[in-house]
Image: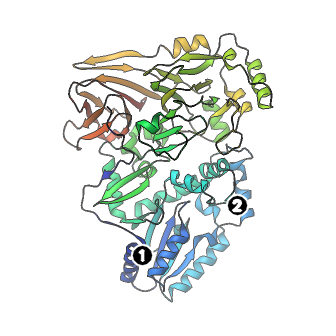
Amino acid sequence: MHQKYDKRPIIPVSAATWAMRSWRRISHHLGMAVQAKGSGITLTIDCYPGVDQLQIASAMNAEMPHLKILSSGCATKCQSDLDALLAPFLTDDRVFGCMSPLRMEELLDPGRVQCMRRKIEAERQKGPVAVVGIGAAEIWPGDILVVADMPRWEIQKRLRAGARNWTADNPDEDMLRKFKRGYFVEWRVADRHKLPLLKRADYFLDTTVDRDPKLVDGDSMRLALAETTTRPFRVVPFFDPGIWGGQWMREKFSLPADKPNYAWGFDCVPEENSLVFSFGGVELEVPALNLVLMHPVELLGPDVHSRFGAEFPIRFDFLDTFDGGNLSLQVHPTKEFIRECFGVPYTQDESYYIMAAGPGAAVYLGMKDGADTESFFHALEAAQDGGAHPDIERFVNRWPARQHDHFSIPAGTVHCCASNCVVLEISATPYIFTFKLWDWGRTGMDGLPRPVHLDYGRTVLCEDRNTSWVKNSVLALTEPVAQGDRWREERTGLHELEFIETRRHWFDGPVSHKTKGSVHVLNVVDGDRAVIESPDGSFAPYFINYAETVIIPELVGSYTVRPLKDGQCHATIRASVRI
């Protein structure tokens, strides 16, 4: 019987720190801080897109009725100017845009900014002033700076519920277009703006849980982030239903019954996941991306950082089709295509590690030897136009899938997972760049047709990734590497074209690991409960259950993994960047 999967891992902060919760306490504390600074003080509350600015302003006003509150939104460019500025990055496509290099000051109107600054100066002569909103610190640095942050997964939930994007009045717009606006423009601008603020903020404000805010001082938060690079940790996973979703995760992870299924489980996507820190019993949730931005070298390793910058390049997530349907038949863009078309420096090479397999479990992978690509796309186009469903197995290989099989899927390879599988997807991070070729005639859970990109797919599909190639280059990838007392190591999964190296360890006793220049991401794929330990005691023992994903910062250096119950057989899959 597996131990319970931890859906909200907590990172304790070791040093004596303080934090508080509730708007009453927070606004009172900030009011006292303003008062202690003297007259003419400016409180700047810089918000990430998605933060409820009206709720913040209302809470501050309730405790400090004499505080003059100004909104940074008054300095944003008018909608027509924003539309013209952002159009090249948003494009007309429903899903794909182009990565924006824009900075916060470019989305603000210079005249409006100057007008706001004059008003702030005037109001400061009368009493304390608060500037609240996105880009507030660009308008006025503030005598006291509060960063109000928001994990991207929570932003997406709010957008789905009818919230507007920062740069558009679009409460009823298609969610894919809302996400695209955030992914390609808004979050990129906000992250560039946020990094220097993280280094100097006086306070961090967590409003992830509506009407349950928490506040911590800046030094305590920076200490928490720095400590995290010295030990194993987990991000907070999140789960989402899908048209093809299954039931395995619901049972194994004790997920709520209010969803029809669970298609995705995101257990290591630091761009979207969060971290939860415990400050003396008060739990603050912050974007995991803050750790990547603040400590990229310690987390990733110097070589990985020099290659990818402050981006976490490895993704672990679950795809559950148990008692569900096939994934969409798809292909990912080649490195050249994703760079030239979308402005992204690396592509979504990936692999499928089979956690569980039921009757008929299979993976579609590679074109069949001799299959005519033009006929394949002609059949797909006809089906997209309302014609007969294509005979996919006439063109694409279907391979049986068993538990612990590991299929490599370099970009450009046609693929999908069939029903009755649970996949641990180990891949590079640019996770939205999937060109669907066929979706088995389904509509999305929103009732809209799921986007299909045959033109893109035709451009990037590698015809030579065929039956023979799959047999020789993918199905035979597992090979013994080393073994010792009570353990053995195998290289498995990812192709030499891919930058991620994966190693599987089978063990019933301790196994030694060394980061050797790269961050490690590790999942318990067999067994019950393992413990990660430091050979020199530099971090406390860290316990990890079946199917949980843990990140080992490169700074950790050496660590061991052993079963909690000595002699019980376990297996882990470990990913790192090839150096």
Q: Which labelled disc corresponds to residue 27?
A: 1
Residue positioned most to the bottom: 126
Residue 91 visible:
yes
Q: Residue at x 46, y 75 (%)?
A: 43
Q: Is residue 100 visible?
A: no
Give the quadrant of residue 205.
Answer: bottom left
Quadrant of the image for the N terminus? top left
Could you say which is closer to the camera, residue 423 or residue 534? 423
Label drawn at residue 323: none
- Give SS at disc 2: helix
Q: Is residue 369 left or right of residue 515?
A: right
- Dot 1: few (<14), some (14–19), or many (≥20) neighbours within 10 Å? many
Seen as rendered, the residue at the extreme front is: 257
Q: Quadrant of residue 518?
A: top left
The residue beneath circle 2 is 82
Q: Earlier in the sequence, mark 1 or mark 2?
A: 1
Residue type at numbered disc 2: Leu
The picture places residue 552, in percent across and down from the top left corner, at 34, 39
Looking at the picture, does residue 445 appear above or below residue 38?
Answer: above
Q: CA distance from mark 1 to mark 2?
A: 33 Å
Query: In this image, 163 relative to 544: left or right?
Result: right
Q: Is residue 563 left or right of residue 33?
A: left
Q: Residue at x 51, y 47 (%)?
A: 258
Instruction: Please provide percent x and percent y for residue 59.
Output: 47, 75
Q: How many marks?
A: 2
Q: Is residue 128 left or right of residue 110?
A: left
Q: Position of residue 254 (x, y in %)?
A: 41, 41
Residue 449 locus on image (x, y percent): 71, 40
- Quadrant containing the C terminus is top left
